[in-house]
Image (tube, rainbow, N blue to C red):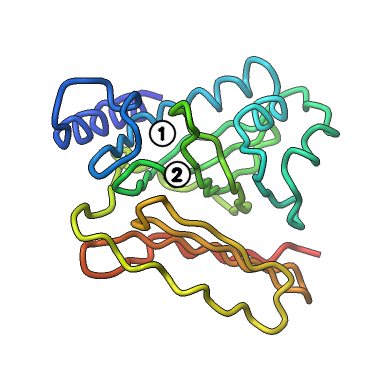
Amino acid sequence: MKRIALGLALVAVFAASAQTDARPRRRLPPGTGTANPSALVAEEIAFARLAREKGQWKAFREFADDTAIMFVPQEVQAQDWLKKQADPAAPVQWEPHQVWMSCDGTLGVTKGAWQRPDGSVGWYTTIWQRQKKGEYRWVLDHGDTLQSALPEPDMLTARVAKCGRRPDAPPPGTPPADARTFTGGNSLDGTLRWHVTVMSANDARTVSVQLWNGTGFDTIVEDKVTPQG
């Protein structure tokens, strides 16, 4: 937790260095240069705290967008699935290691590690969308198990898309012929975009996220998961 606190402080300093005034960044309307990674990290920490204090699935419901999807391991509409679930006696715990955000702050991504009470460990990626009142709600959550825990980085890291020239609208893309699901989204300014593809045959999924660097897009996430039968 100390590492997260230090990382959150670093992200806050990073975000403050890009501000044009001293007003709280979360109160600004979306626009060029208004990204605030520390606000998203704070949301992630509040999400994990609610899971510990009030119940795992209650927290997932409260922090989910109405359109959110998750994998159990097949994809489901999160709100429909979550409202039918009873909270486990002890929740999964997690912490972010990396954060990315669009220039305008309307879309963000967190990636990190989770641990279950039974000792199993894994990783997760969560995509967050800013709401009208400035808070963030997740629109996609997925992950997988690992044989051993992810190494803890020395510091939580954050990266914001390059501001300035607005990227052209991305092409719609063509899903593979044998894909069951092909969906995604973009930040309002187009500087962060994501898509998920789920194959019909084995439920294998790919979650890909790209961040604008000023002249093109860098792939910052390329998760590939094949659920175990």
Q: Are marks 1 and 2 in contact (CB under 8 Å)?
A: yes
- Given residues 4 and 76, the one toward you in this image is 76
Residue visible at 55% across and 50% down?
Answer: 148
| Label 1 Cα crowd, 10 Å radius (few <14 / some 14-19 / many 20+) | many
Residue visible at 35% across and 41% down?
Answer: 105
The residue tagged with tag 2: helix, strand or loop?
strand
Any mark on residue 110, and which?
Answer: 2
**Image location of residue 95, percent across then percent down:** 48, 35
Q: Quadrant of the C terminus?
A: bottom right
Write down the residue under mark 1.
40
Q: Marks 1/2: CA distance?
A: 8 Å
Give the residue at the far top of this rendering: 53
The residue tagged with tag 1: helix, strand or loop?
helix
Identify the mark nearer the N-term, 1 or 2: 1
Under mark 1, the amino acid is Leu
Which of label 1 and label 2 is nearer to you? 1
The part of the image, by quadrant, that contains residue 39 is top left
